[in-house]
Image (cartoon, rainbow, N blue to C red):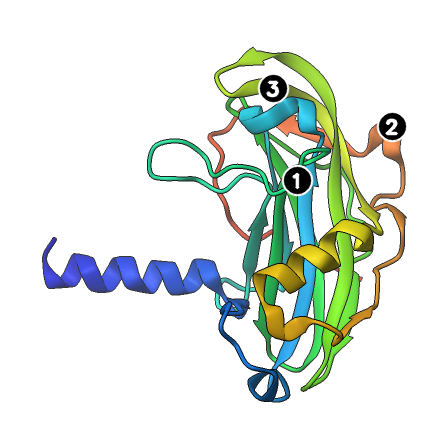
């Protein structure tokens, strides 16, 4: 790879990572005092395995700030194993800029389709200050069966919802980053469906799945 391609690839990685930086396992309690940290899990129904992938966008008003949180992480050969047995997905422990943030986009990619919200709905807004470690909950995608594909079942519909899974998520976060022990405060986002109408919440597109920020909602 030449230098120009390397620079381009590195720049693309920075765009995809956005402002959410994974907190290192060896982070110390003193270092945490200077960070604003959030904990959130992104999952979908376990029976779909890697046949579907839920994607949640944070601060996606621009490519410079967006963070992508996925229920299926791509590995070199096969997807990374789920961190849970009763749901398929991953836990994220992220350092963010102190202040106001929001989850403002959602889609599921499955069998060449993109399943996304038909109508705009309210953003999931939160605020975190320097020195805080907040558990925001589990953003879980309930999916509708499609057919068998490589890796699991495909999805032909679904909707996102917020669930309090602090029983699993906080101990897992503390095992990932031991310095978090005793510092996590529960600040779960509004529990329930993240949509106005569950039955009419999604639409499908046959376009190739492209991970881009959703357009800002006009109010």
Residue 168 falls left or right of residue 71: right
Instruction: Inspect this view and state whether residue 183 appears.
Output: yes
| Residue 73 drawn at (x, y percent) | 49, 42
Query: Callout 2: helix, strand or loop?
Result: helix
In the rendered image of this protein, does residue 77 appear above or below residue 212? above
Q: Nearer the viewer, residue 214 or 28?
A: 28
The percent position of residue 36, horizontal first and vertical second, equals: 65, 79
> In the rendering, at what x and y percent does residue 202 appear?
75, 32
Q: Which of the labelled discs sits on residue 154, or is there none?
A: 3
Estimate how packed mark 3 is, as few (under 14), some (14 to 19) or many (20 or more) residues with alpha carbons within 10 Å: many
Q: Residues within 10 Å of mark 2 (few under 14, many from 20)?
A: few
> What residue appears at the point 25 percent right and 60 percent down from the top-left corner?
8
Q: Which comes sooner in the sequence, label 3 or label 2?
A: 3
Taking the image as drawn, is residue 61 in sight?
A: no
| Mark in front: 1 vs 3 | 1
Q: Nearer the viewer, mark 3 or mark 2?
A: 3
Q: Give the structural element (helix, strand or loop) at label 3.
A: strand
Name which residue lies at 60% across and 79% down.
Answer: 97
Between 139 and 199, the one nearer to me in the picture: 139
Disc number placed over residue 217 in the picture, else none: none
In the displayed structure image, the side of residue 202 where residue 94 appears, left or right: left
Q: CA distance from mark 1 to mark 3?
A: 19 Å
Q: Which mark is residue 199?
A: 2
Q: Quadrant of the C terminus?
A: bottom right
Tell me the number on the disc at residue 84.
Answer: 1
Q: Earlier in the sequence, mark 1 or mark 3?
A: 1
- The percent position of residue 47, horizontal first and vertical second, equals 68, 22
Specify the quadrant of the image occupied by residue 146.
top right
């Amino acid at each position: 790879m030449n230098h120009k391609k390397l620079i381009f690839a590195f720049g693309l990685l920075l765009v995809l990572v956005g402002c959410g930086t994974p907190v290192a396992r060896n982070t110390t309690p003193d270092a945490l005092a200077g960070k604003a940290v959030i904990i959130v899990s992104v999952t979908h129904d376990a029976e779909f395995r890697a046949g579907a992938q839920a994607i949640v966008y944070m601060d996606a008003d621009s490519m410079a700030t967006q963070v992508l949180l996925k229920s299926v992480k791509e590995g070199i050969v096969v997807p990374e194993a789920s961190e849970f047995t009763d749901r398929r997905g991953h836990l994220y422990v992220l350092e963010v800029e102190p202040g106001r943030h929001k989850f403002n986009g959602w889609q599921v990619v499955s069998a060449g389709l993109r399943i996304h919200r038909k109508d705009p709905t309210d953003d999931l807004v939160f605020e975190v200050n320097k020195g805080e470690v907040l558990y925001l909950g589990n953003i879980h995608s309930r999916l509708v069966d499609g057919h068998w594909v490589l890796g699991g079942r495909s999805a032909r519909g679904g909707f996102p919802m917020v669930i309090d899974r602090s029983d699993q998520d906080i101990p897992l976060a503390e095992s990932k980053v031991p310095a978090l022990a005793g510092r996590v405060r529960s600040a779960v986002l509004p529990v329930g469906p993240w949509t106005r109408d569950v039955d009419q919440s999604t639409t499908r597109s046959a376009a190739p799945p492209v991970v881009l920020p959703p357009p800002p909602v006009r109010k």
